[in-house]
Amino acid sequence: MFNFRKSNENTQSSGEGKVIAFMNQKGGVGKTTMAYNTARALSEKGHKVLCLDMDPQFNFSSLFGYDPKIHTHNIFNLMINSVRELKALHTGALLSEAIVKTDSGIDLIPSSQALSGFELTVAGINAPRQLVLNRFIEKNRLREYYDYIVIDGPPTLGLLVVNILCAVDGVLFPFIPDSFSEQGLKNIQEVLLDIEDMGIVKTPKNLGYIPNLFESRRKQANEDFKSIKEEFPQAHVYAPFSNKANFAKSMSSRKSVFDFQAKDYKELQGQFLKMATEIEAQL
């Protein structure tokens, strides 16, 4: 049986766990990379962390070595199983069987391509479709077992994104300083306003914007960065992550920056640890 109680060993937080998501409608901004390394940073700080992959492309899962041929249960199965009206579609998947214990000490609930059919699958239910993920987390008492649940969301604006935003305490927005990312950030903000208007859940906190793949020597990049900061003047903006070869190397080898001992990675490790500290402070 899965033991839903936090261990007091090697943990720095107590009480109810926090759920955070990394979102941007624009793809290719390093959202998955940021989620992966931030989860590792939170784990390095002694927290019990669960990573939840809500992107049908399952790149987040792949970074942890997930193989869909080996691990047949995923978040789609679990969410559908949690909806009573969809009993005809229920599988025998148990949460304890779906959770993948990774080498990094972080737990993972993987995604699958089946998640792309989520919106169609729940289209006819009477229960609030936007709260399926939220109720899954509550029903399984995941906040009681984990200090942080880190969600990687899809680069879309559909029902999956609404489910994520209705389930989290805070959202981080990775972006590349350009006009396309700026528009993607604006679109996500509109969804957040829609959730606030619905009034059925507490609107998640904006935990800040994360400039990624920043090239400080490029004039246009600096101008775009300035423009985005002016567009969201009230939000916190983290120190930019530069477009460095060692960062790209870690991702191409499907490793975290914390898996490298070389001095070249100390700065990146420090950035992610600082970001984790700021997340702790805000939540």
Image (tube, helix red, strand yellow):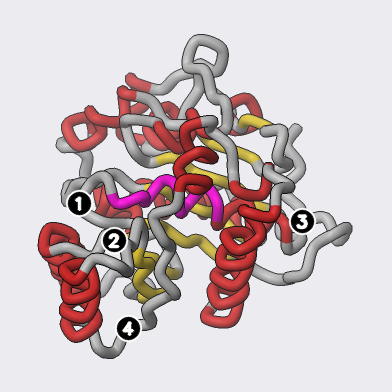
Q: Amino acid at mark 3?
A: Lys
Which is nearer the N-term, disc 1 or disc 4? 1
Dot label at residue 52: none
Which is nearer the N-term, disc 2 or disc 4? 2
Which residue in the structure is indicated by mark 3? 6
> Which residue is more in the foreground, 103 or 171?
103
* Callout 1 crowding tier (Cα within 10 Å): few <14, some 14–19, many ≥20: many
User: Residue 248 lies in what quarter of the image?
Assistant: top left
Q: Amino acid at mark 4?
A: Ala
Residue 215, given in percent of the width and then of the height, sits at: 32, 62
Residue 196, given in percent of the width and then of the height, sits at: 23, 75
Which residue in the structure is indicated by mark 1? 26
Dominant secondary structure (helix, strand or loop) of the stretch shown in magenta = helix
Quadrant of the rendering where the C terminus is positioned = bottom right
Which is nearer the N-term, disc 1 or disc 2? 1
Q: CB under 8 Å between callouts 1 and 2?
A: yes
Q: Amino acid at mark 1?
A: Lys
Q: Is residue 9 left or right of residue 197?
A: right
Q: Residue at x 33, y 62 (%)?
A: 214
Q: Residue at x 56, y 67 (%)?
A: 271
Real-space Cα separation, disc 1 to disc 4, in angstroms? 19 Å
> Which residue is more in the foreground, 248 or 150?
248
Image: magenta residue range: 29-37
Real-space Cα separation, disc 3 to disc 4, in angstroms? 32 Å
Q: Amino acid at mark 2?
A: Phe
User: Residue 202 lies in what quarter of the image?
Assistant: bottom left
